[in-house]
Amino acid sequence: MMRRSFCAAFIFAATQIAGIAHADNYSPPGELEPNSGSGYRSSVIFRPAMRFPIDDGKAFANSQVYRAGGMYGSGGGQCDAKNYAYPWRDNFCEKRSRATLMCPSGQGHQGQDIRPGTCKASLYWAVAAENGIVTNIGSYSVTIQGSSGAIFRYLHLDMRNLRVKALDKVSRGEKIGQVSNFFNGTPTTIHLHFEIKQAVVVNGTRIITFVPPYTSLVAAHKALLAGTP
């Protein structure tokens, strides 16, 4: 009886884990929060071999501005349970004044915001998406040039406790720093703003620009949860 109960519990737990990566947990690319902008609706995965940038995979990709606790969000604070639940939401083209060529309006957010597993700063580790080199440490950012040529930028880490410095070589999956809310004194939520910049061909011309990270993040997250990061 004990063995049967254990097996049943194991099967239930395995089913729950498998369910984490269910397709319904990820809204389609380009589907933004209501009234937050017009998204880039494409299933192209720009970095198919990328490592998910939060170490343990416990993460929720969604808006910081148009969710609870945000400037244009519903009532409540950033720690509202709705912010830490599926489905994920793309916000690469969320309304901003920054030039973002791949967005329908030509402007947008330039990256994807990702909340860590819980509403706690300086607990969850951000990791290198590819082998590469740290090319810049800003006041609230870390930039890595990947071996593929792609540029990855990590914003709002705990800048007091970084594990890397400029010109360090990093390996895919290596810990960089902890997800926090550093923003030069400007209030922001606890999250990782993650960007990818790479070469693409637009109207026959090769340019280097910000590309939508959402589909790459979904693919990397599914791989990590499946045990093949």
Image (spheres, rainbow, N blue to C red):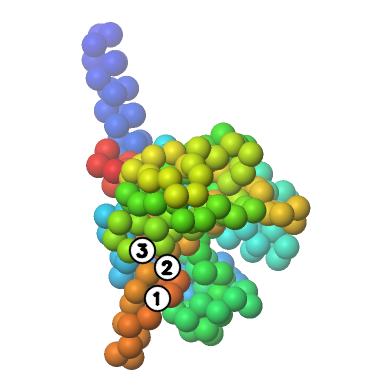
Label 2: few (<14), some or many (≥20) within 10 Å?
many
**Secondary structure of the residue carrying numbered label 2:** strand
- Proximity of marks 3 and 2: CB atoms separated by less than 8 Å: yes
Residue at the limit of the structure toward the top, as seen here: 2
Q: Name which quarter of the figure residue 186 lies in.
A: bottom right
Front position in the image: 136 or 222: 136
Residue linked to disc 1: 208
Mark 1 or 2 closer to N-term? Answer: 2
> Of the residues shown, which amino acid type is indicated by label 2?
Lys
- Proximity of marks 1 and 2: CB atoms separated by less than 8 Å: yes
Residue linked to disc 2: 197
- Cα–Cα gap, marks 1 and 2: 7 Å
Give the residue displayed 50% in from the left and 64% down from the top: 111
- Image height of 224 relative to 35, above or below: above
Front position in the image: 32 or 179: 179
- Image height of 101 relative to 135, above or below: below
Give the residue displayed 46% in from the left and 56% down from the top: 135
The answer to whether 119 appears left or right of 40 in the picture is right
Q: Tag on residue 150?
A: 3
Mark 3 or 1 closer to N-term? Answer: 3
Position of the N terminus, as image quadrant, is top left
Question: What x and y, as percent, mark residue 223?
Answer: 29, 47
Label 1: few (<14), some or many (≥20) within 10 Å?
few
> Of the residues shown, which amino acid type is indicated by label 1?
Ile
Give the residue displayed 32% in from the left and 22% down from the top: 9
**Secondary structure of the residue carrying numbered label 3:** loop
